[in-house]
Image (tube, rainbow, N blue to C red):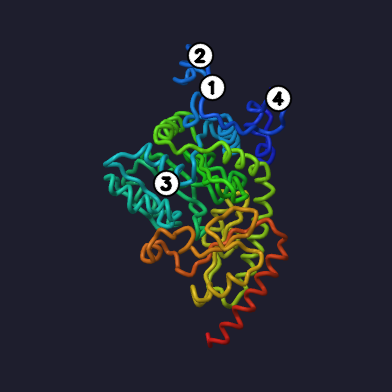
Amino acid sequence: MKEEKVNVGTQAVWAGEKEVLVHGASQVPVIVSVAYSYDDMDEWYDVAVGKKQGHIYGRNTNPTVQAFENKVKALEGAEAATSFSTGMAAISNTLYTFLQPGDRIVSIKDTYGGTNKIFIEFLPKMGIEVALCETGNHEAIAKEIEKGCKILYLETPTNPTVKITDIELMAKKGKEVGALVVVDNTFATPINQNPLALGADLVLHSATKFLGGHADALGGVVCGSKELVEQIYHYREINGATLDPWAAYLLLRGMKTLKLRVRQQEKNALAIAKFLEQQELVEGVYYPGLESHVNHDIAKKQMRGFGGMLSFSLKGGMDAVRILLPQLKYANRAANLGAVETTYGPARTTSHVESTPEERAAMGIPEGLVRLSAGIEDTEDLIQDLEQAFAILKDSAVAIGE
């Protein structure tokens, strides 16, 4: 019998939940028990050593958390998944699982600020060589890969510059030298991109962002083959960065509307990007859905949609940002993204607040760069909001003679 193909929107609603439902409930329960009791000593042992399915202790596994993992696993087309307390826990635990002194990792310059800190501060202290390449310069990345590496780490689109890397091309190069290919898929989401299908070995998310979508739960997740994920799970269970079951429930609930949210968010993002391109006070607009984006063609090839994230820079830098952002009515000015509300924030106080001005400059991130996470509001209201804010910015610029 031919296996039925289930579309990603349906999987977002149904996947991973049935085996956890109890008492005829239609929603996954929040199970907060720290430990699980067994009358049969042999069964308890078999569960404890992994010979039999089940749960023994909350730091290891939890039914609510497992439902979340299984849902993401289905959306990414993976064999296995394991979760974490935060997105950065997912990233750091994955890297520390496979790297040891003397190893080499190749990545790109403008990854998320926390990830970049691991590359430039923590890994070198462990005796691990890090080679960071210009994002989008596939020839330079390939040359570094050819020198050999244990891990090739990609983030595409990047946070906050929204640059694109050709996953299929770079994964092929990585495999040629035996590298483990890891891709941060937070911005694209499984709705728009599946790195495993493009040749990656592991795909990870800050679930706090688009997967949860409501800015009310922290979490992270990594997916891939059973063999690789079991190694990461072992590192996580010992080091303790466990996802809380209540957070897992909130992430599960948020994921049911993932496809609907992403489609409205990218509709808004494209409209906003096109509006910003027409503003004389805007210096640059960065969105992979624009034909002007340097890697628009690669984005079209590997993504099913361009997502809800963009960034832009203003003439006048932070002085202009200080005038524009407070005027916006339908905007959170906050260090978050992927939520149902539209959110603005300069990179220097959001994605790369941990970085120095010099480090941000080296990554190609201007001090006045604004990261914009489009929400699910009506498009015309967001555009009107920007129109009135830019009118005030223009009057202010005229008043001070700029």
Count neighbours of disc 1 (C-alpha within 10 A) and say few if under 14, some if 14 to 19, many if 20 or more.
some
Q: Earlier in the sequence, mark 2 or mark 1?
A: 2
Q: Earlier in the sequence, mark 4 or mark 1?
A: 4
Q: Is residue 107 left or right of residue 340?
A: left
The reply to whether the C-beta atoms of the residues labelled 4 and 1 are less than 8 Å apart is no
Count neighbours of disc 3 (C-alpha within 10 A) and say few if under 14, some if 14 to 19, many if 20 or more.
many
| Residue 261, position as x, y percentages in the image | 67, 50
Structural distance between the alpha carbons of marks 2 and 1:
9 Å
- Above or below, 360 against 44 in this view is below
Structural distance between the alpha carbons of marks 3 and 2:
40 Å
Q: Which residue is mark 3?
A: 153
Element marked by disc 4: loop
Count neighbours of disc 4 (C-alpha within 10 A) and say few if under 14, some if 14 to 19, many if 20 or more.
few
| Residue 114, position as x, y percentages in the image | 42, 52
Structural distance between the alpha carbons of marks 4 and 1:
19 Å
The reply to whether residue 77 is in sight is: no
Q: Earlier in the sequence, mark 1 or mark 3?
A: 1
Asked which quadrant contains residue 343, the reply is: bottom right
Q: Nearer the viewer, mark 3 or mark 2?
A: 2
The reply to whether the C-beta atoms of the residues labelled 2 and 1 are less than 8 Å apart is yes
Q: Which residue is mark 1?
A: 54
Q: Which residue is mark 4?
A: 23
Count neighbours of disc 2 (C-alpha within 10 A) and say few if under 14, some if 14 to 19, many if 20 or more.
some
Q: Which residue is mark 2?
A: 43
Q: Residue at image x 68%, y 69%?
A: 385
